[in-house]
């Protein structure tokens, strides 16, 4: 998994609950107070690396998991140093939310025949919709569905106002997200729905 933030932590938890036996978490960021309201980790993990703390949580809560690896660095640095971390997996899930990182990942997927397929996942502002797109080396191109800034060309909802807000107390500029609930759908895939809790 590339990205252990709000969406990535939910996806990692769901994968563990469905019986996945091994997972590798890659995320360079520290958990901060503005993240706590929408992240699987809580206040006690603030100022710890998301990937490390999520790995510890999964190991403690899901003893069936045989292998939980974590890297507190961006995927590009890790890939330059240890490409086998990526090549030795069956599937990569990217929930990074950064067009620079995911655009580069798309280039690698498209240029390396033996690179595993990638599921890119993201939520629209206010969590009105979630998206997951599977891209392999011989399939469609992830970048073809995005504009030059990485915004999806097809969205469920269009906003006639800016969707970023300054978070109260912290003064950080971010998109306001509702809680996200990831549910398995009847056809074997997963759907993302805004939380009503």
Image (cartoon, rainbow, N blue to C red):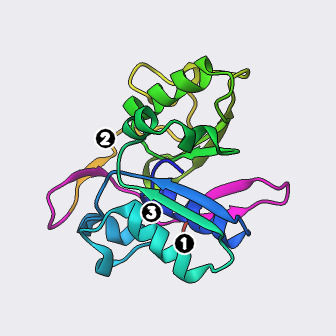
Q: Which of marks 3 and 1 is nearer the N terminus?
A: 3
Q: Is residue 197 visible?
A: no
Going by the image, does 79 lie left or right of 165?
Answer: right
Q: Name the residue under label 3.
A: 178
Q: Mark 2 points at which residue?
A: 162
- Residue 5, above or below 110: below
User: Where residue 168 appears, x then y in whole percent?
Assistant: 19, 65
**Residue 182 on the magenta segment:** yes
Per the image, label 1 sits on a secondary structure element best described as loop
- Residue at (56% x, 64% y) in the render: 68
Q: Which of marks 3 and 2 is nearer the N terminus?
A: 2
Question: Which mark is nearer the camera, 3 or 2?
Answer: 3
Q: Mark 1 points at which residue?
A: 196
Going by the image, does 154 lie left or right of 28?
Answer: right
Q: Can residue 18 be seen in this view?
A: yes
Which segment did they paint magenta?
168-194
Per the image, label 3 sits on a secondary structure element best described as loop
Q: Kindly report the distance in space between the C-alpha atoms of the residues bearing marks 2 and 1.
A: 23 Å
Crowding at label 2, few (<14), some or many (≥20) Cα neighbours within 10 Å? few
- Residue at (15% x, 63% y) in the render: 170
Between 126 and 66, the residue placed more toward the observer is 66
Q: Earlier in the sequence, mark 2 or mark 1?
A: 2
Between 183 and 117, the residue placed more toward the observer is 117
User: Where residue 42 appears, x then y in whole percent?
Assistant: 36, 77
Tell me where residue 31 sits by quadrant.
bottom left
User: Where residue 151 appears, x then y in whole percent?
Assistant: 45, 30
Q: Kindly report the distance in space between the C-alpha atoms of the residues bearing marks 3 and 2.
A: 16 Å
State if disc 1 and disc 3 touch (CB < 8 Å): no
């Amino acid at each position: 998994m590339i990205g252990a933030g709000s969406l990535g932590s939910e996806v990692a938890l769901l994968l563990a609950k469905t019986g996945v036996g091994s997972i590798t978490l890659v995320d360079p960021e520290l958990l901060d107070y503005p993240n706590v309201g929408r992240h699987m980790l809580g206040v006690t993990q603030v100022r710890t690396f998301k990937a490390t703390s999520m790995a510890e949580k999964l190991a403690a809560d899901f003893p069936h998991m045989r292998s939980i690896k974590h890297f507190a660095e961006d995927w590009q640095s890790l890939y330059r140093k240890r490409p086998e971390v990526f090549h030795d997996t069956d599937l990569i899930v990217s929930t990074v939310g950064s067009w620079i990182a995911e655009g580069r990942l798309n280039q690698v997927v498209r240029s390396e025949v033996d690179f595993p397929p990638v599921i890119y996942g993201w939520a629209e502002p206010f969590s009105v919709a979630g998206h997951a797109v599977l891209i392999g080396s011989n399939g469609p191109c992830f970048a073809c569905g995005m504009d030059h800034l990485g915004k999806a060309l097809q969205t469920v909802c269009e906003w006639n106002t800016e969707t970023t807000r300054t978070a109260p107390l912290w003064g950080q500029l971010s998109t306001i997200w509702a809680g996200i609930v990831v549910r398995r759908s009847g056809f074997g895939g997963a759907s993302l729905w805004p939380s009503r809790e």
